[in-house]
Image (cartoon, rainbow, N blue to C red):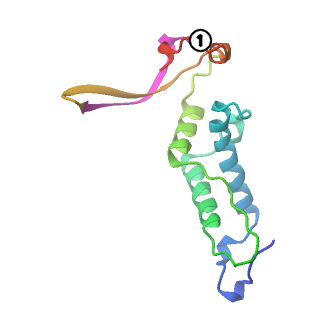
């Protein structure tokens, strides 16, 4: 276990020390971030890494890593930070992993809507929905028409 200042110095609270808790929280954040990275073509996300986690566990991991990133720094000493997902990404990944249609290839008629609410804008009511949909990856990689996938 390494720290940047001794516990007795008062600079680093004991709950901010590197250790298994921080390592697990960092791994959870990395697994969540992988979902956003995959949409940018930067690797593959592994749903099995977050499938057994509750939303609370995901949010707690994010909070722990944020506290680590915000720890007091000592001038002249190198320090590291970890990439932290936004809470909306955490919620989206949780919803995707826990409410996704398990069939390998869905169509527009089998899309799942786990969240729906109505919002009034410009004098009209608009339905806001979160849709979980399955499409063949070739339709995205070929740049096909995505109007039915919104």
Q: Which residue is mark 1?
A: 144
Q: Name the residue: 64% across, 14% down.
A: 136
Q: Residue 145: x, y in percent?
A: 54, 11
Q: Is residue 139 magenta?
A: no
Helix or strand or loop: what does disc 1 sit on?
loop
The correct choice, above or below, for 125 with respect to 135 in the image is below
Residue ID at (67%, 75%):
73
Q: Residue furthest right?
A: 1
Q: Nearer the viewer, residue 120 or 131?
A: 120
Give the magenta part as a residue range: 105-120
Query: Is the residue 78 above or below the residue 60 in the image?
Result: below
Q: Could you say where residue 69 lies in the image, as x and y percent from the top left? A: 64, 64
The residue sitting at the bottom extreme is 8
**Is residue 11 or residue 28 the one in the foreground?**
11
Q: Residues within 10 Å of mark 1 (few under 14, many from 20)?
A: few
Observer-nearest of 128 and 123:
123
| Residue 11 x, y percent position in the rendering | 65, 82
**101 with respect to 7 (left or right):** left
- The residue under the point 66% across, 13% down is 142
Q: Is residue 110 in the magenta section? A: yes
At x 63% / y 75%, what residue is drawn?
72
């Amino acid at each position: 276990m390494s720290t940047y200042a001794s516990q007795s110095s008062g600079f680093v609270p004991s709950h901010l020390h590197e250790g298994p808790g921080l390592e697990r929280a960092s791994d959870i954040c990395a697994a969540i971030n992988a979902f956003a990275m995959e949409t940018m073509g930067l690797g593959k996300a592994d749903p099995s890494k977050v499938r057994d986690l509750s939303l609370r566990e995901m949010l707690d991991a994010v909070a722990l890593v944020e506290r680590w990133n915000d720890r007091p720094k000592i001038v002249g000493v190198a320090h590291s930070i970890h990439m932290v997902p936004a809470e909306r990404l955490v919620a989206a990944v949780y919803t995707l992993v826990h409410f996704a249609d398990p069939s390998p290839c869905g169509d527009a008629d089998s899309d799942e809507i786990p969240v729906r609410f109505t919002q009034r804008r410009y004098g009209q009511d608009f339905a806001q929905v979160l849709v979980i949909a399955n499409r063949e990856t070739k339709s995205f990689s070929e740049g096909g028409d995505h109007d039915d996938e919104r």
